[in-house]
């Protein structure tokens, strides 16, 4: 009876040691604390104080700490971003323009500030060039509006094979230089062009009858040929947004095509016509290559007058005065174009 008591008391001691070892198997080593079931492997941070942070809890490099969030990133002033583009614009555009204005106000002969303006405005060549420029620009704009509206109607509402290809070609045509169209017209209607050559070969005449390219009408034809796609492009965009149900209803009520164009299509296309017409007016006002390549010696526009004063006569003050006038008219028309385009949604 005295030997059974110690044996019974040893069983609880053995069972109480197993949870301390982390629930390891009885077959695993228990001495030295180096086995997989030791206390050091089961709880590596068990000896640290409750307030200490381990390596996984420390802030990693590149992460934002609460102190950094409180301070916030250092922002760059918004006006500082406008300095580089404004500097480039001033160097490339504004500075040469300022030189032109300065030269027009301070002629080399030492006269007054507005003597060059008074002299140019009083000259017959300036008034003639201004009148020629205005009527050519207005005439070309009117011709482009009529021809562009008619061609856009055919492309948009008359089904024919290749209509989409023609519309794509108009976009490519806009990238052509103006003198290229003039050269093409010279090959056809020039003094030694195809039309005059065919006439002389057929009738045995010394020269052909086609000499209009060297007249203002030839310049007008060349400008209408080149600038018509600039009217067609916004018109085609406007026609693509037109509700075809209106056309079907008008046709079902017995309206003829002419009445449908006047009452339905034309009112919807007026903003696009105004946008395209104002753009053509601005471009015709400053056109130089067409007038030069047609060889029309009697046609003097404002750009041609600037070229003659500066290059041929070396009168830079007069050339700068004409340039300032041309710039003022162009900027005014461009503002009109932007207002009309904004209203048209182009």
Image (cartoon, rainbow, N blue to C red):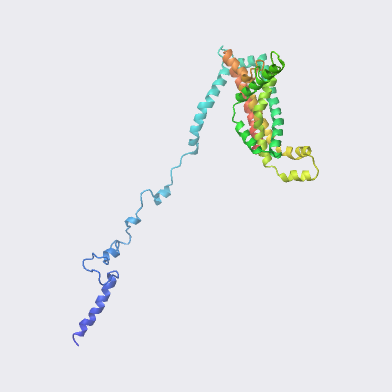
Number of numbered markers = 0
Residue shown at 70% from the left, 42% from the top: 242
| Residue 226 seen in the figure | yes
Point 53% across, 23% down: residue: 96
Residue 282, by quadrant, is top right
Quadrant placement of the C terminus: top right
Residue 268 horizontal/vertical position (percent): 71, 39
For the residue pair 335 and 236, the one nearer the viewer reads as 236
The x and y percentages for residue 32 are 21, 66
| Side of 181 relative to 99 (left or right) | right
Q: Residue at x 49, y 38 (%)?
A: 78
Position of residue 162 measured from the top left corner of the image (x, y, whole percent): 65, 37
Q: Judge whether residue 131 can be spotted in this image.
A: no
Res 296 → quadrant: top right
Please say if 62 is above or below 207: below
Is 145 on the left-hand or right-hand side of 8?
right
What residue appears at the point 40 percent right and 48 percent down from the top-left corner? Answer: 68
The residue most toward the bottom is 1
Quick check: 74 above or below 130? below
* Residue 271 image position (x, y, % from top left): 69, 36
Q: Nearer the viewer, residue 42 or 27?
A: 27
Q: Residue reaching furthest left?
A: 2
Point out the residue furthest to the right here: 254
Along the line of sight, which residue is nearer the eye, 254 or 162? Answer: 162
Tell me if residue 314 comes above or below residue 162 in the rendering: above
């Amino acid at each position: 009876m005295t030997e059974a008591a110690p044996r019974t008391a040893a069983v609880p001691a053995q069972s109480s040691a197993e949870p301390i070892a982390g629930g390891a198997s009885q077959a695993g080593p228990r001495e030295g604390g180096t086995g997989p079931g030791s206390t050091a492997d089961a709880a590596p941070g068990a000896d640290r104080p409750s307030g200490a942070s381990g390596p996984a809890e420390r802030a990693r490099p590149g992460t934002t700490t609460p102190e950094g969030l409180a301070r916030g990133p250092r922002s760059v002033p918004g006006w500082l971003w406008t300095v580089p583009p404004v500097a480039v614009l001033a160097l490339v555009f504004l500075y040469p323009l300022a030189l032109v204005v300065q030269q027009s106000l301070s002629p080399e002969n030492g006269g007054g500030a507005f003597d060059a303006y008074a002299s140019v405005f009083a000259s017959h060549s300036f008034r003639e060039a201004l009148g020629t420029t205005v009527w050519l620009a207005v005439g070309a704009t009117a011709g482009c509006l009529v021809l562009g509206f008619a061609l856009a109607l055919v492309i948009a509402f008359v089904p024919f094979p290749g209509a989409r290809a023609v519309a794509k070609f108009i976009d490519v045509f806009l990238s052509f230089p103006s003198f290229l169209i003039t050269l093409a017209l010279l090959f056809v209607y020039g003094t030694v062009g195809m039309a005059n050559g065919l006439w002389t070969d057929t009738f045995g005449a010394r020269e052909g009858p086609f000499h209009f390219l060297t007249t203002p009408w030839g310049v007008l034809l060349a400008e209408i040929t080149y600038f018509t796609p600039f009217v067609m492009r916004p018109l085609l965009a406007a026609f693509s947004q037109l509700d075809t149900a209106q056309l079907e209803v008008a046709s079902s009520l017995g309206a003829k095509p002419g009445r449908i164009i006047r009452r339905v299509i034309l009112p919807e296309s007026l903003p696009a016509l105004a946008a395209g017409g104002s753009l053509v007016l601005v471009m015709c006002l400053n056109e130089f290559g067409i007038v030069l390549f047609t060889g029309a010696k009697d046609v003097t526009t404002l750009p041609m007058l600037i070229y003659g004063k500066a290059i041929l006569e070396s009168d830079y003050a007069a050339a700068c005065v004409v340039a300032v006038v041309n710039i003022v008219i162009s900027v005014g028309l461009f503002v009109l174009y932007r207002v009309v385009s904004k209203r048209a949604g182009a």
